[in-house]
């Protein structure tokens, strides 16, 4: 199964909270990035990796690009991806989300035709690094970056056409919302290790 949209994996570099590039943290002997890349490779023929460390990704079958605006955070990474994408729509995902579900990604993709953004939203808020964006977002992103805004969520207050996939809808496909699990702290990493070793998911 392959979709005619681009996939962009944001792997910007060192995380301040983790003290290293989260993409190359090992969990059960596998890089976190490889969990993400492996799932995306099954779904997309056009993959972009946005990074500041080109050499670390040279062995992957992907279009590897450096941030067009260094130091511009996840919003700058999205801007770079959309500028480089060969398709109108791009699935943008973080490099540290090891529990991606193809069924949920497919569900988001199916909704894309009449929207500029298709984004999951849980009780914790929107999930901007597991979402679909169109090239129509580029100008809005550039305006935000020019004002010094670096968070993708700022894009959601623009006049773009946005489709929110709410928690009840998401849980029909991903009951524990595990797709959005990522690594921000050492505690997050320990929880991911526990689950990958066969631990039970907590009720979301």
Image (cartoon, helix red, strand yellow):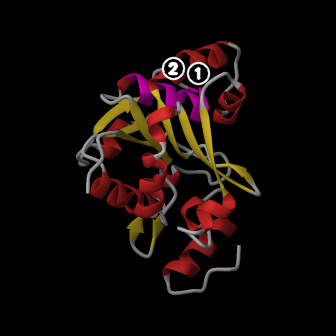
User: Is the Cβ of the residue at disc 2 closer than 8 Å to that at disc 1?
Assistant: yes
Q: Which residue is located at x 32 percent, y 36 percent?
A: 64
186 and 127: which is toward the camera:
127
- The quadrant in which residue 155 appears is top right
Q: Is residue 106 above or below residue 160?
A: below
Mark 2: few/some/many CA within 10 Å (<14, 14-19, 20+): some
- The quadrant in which residue 129 appears is top right
Q: Which residue is mark 1?
A: 141
160 and 59: which is toward the camera:
160
Residue 153 in the image, given as x and y percentages of width and height? 68, 36
- The quadrant in which residue 149 appears is top right
State the mark number for residue 60: none
Residue 41 in the image, given as x and y percentages of width and height? 29, 54
Q: Which residue is located at x 60 percent, y 73 percent?
A: 175
Q: Which residue is located at x 55 percent, y 27 percent?
A: 76
Badge 1 element? helix
Quadrant (top left/top right/bottom left/bottom right) for the C terminus: bottom right
Q: Is residue 179 above or below residue 44?
A: below
State the mark number for residue 138: 2
Residue 85 in the image, given as x and y percentages of width and height? 35, 29
Mark 1: few/some/many CA within 10 Å (<14, 14-19, 20+): many
Q: Which residue is located at x 65 percent, y 45 percent?
A: 16
Q: Which residues are magenta?
A: 71-83
37 falls in the magenta region: no
82 falls in the magenta region: yes
- What is the spatial separation of the Cα atoms under label 2 and label 1, in whole angstroms? 5 Å
Residue 46 in the image, given as x and y percentages of width and height? 27, 40
Quadrant (top left/top right/bottom left/bottom right) for the N terminus: bottom left
């Amino acid at each position: 199964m392959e979709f005619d949209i681009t996939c962009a994996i944001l792997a910007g570099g060192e995380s301040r909270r983790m003290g290293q590039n989260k993409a190359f943290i090992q969990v059960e002997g596998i890089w976190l990035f490889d969990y993400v890349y492996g799932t995306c490779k099954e779904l997309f023929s056009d993959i972009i990796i946005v990074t500041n460390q080109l050499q670390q990704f040279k062995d992957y079958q992907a279009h590897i690009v450096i941030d067009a605006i260094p130091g511009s955070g996840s919003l700058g990474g999205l801007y770079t991806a959309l500028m480089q994408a060969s398709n109108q729509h791009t699935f943008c995902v973080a490099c540290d989300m090891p529990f991606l579900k193809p069924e949920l990604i497919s569900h988001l993709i199916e909704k894309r035709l009449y929207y500029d953004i298709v984004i999951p939203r849980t009780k914790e808020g929107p999930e901007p690094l597991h979402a679909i964006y169109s090239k129509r977002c580029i100008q809005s992103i550039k305006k935000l970056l020019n004002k010094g805004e670096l968070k993708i969520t700022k894009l959601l207050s623009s006049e773009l056409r946005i489709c929110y996939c709410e928690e009840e809808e998401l849980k029909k496909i991903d009951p524990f919302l595990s797709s959005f699990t990522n690594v921000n702290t050492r505690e997050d990493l320990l929880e991911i290790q526990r689950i990958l070793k066969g631990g039970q998911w907590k009720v979301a």
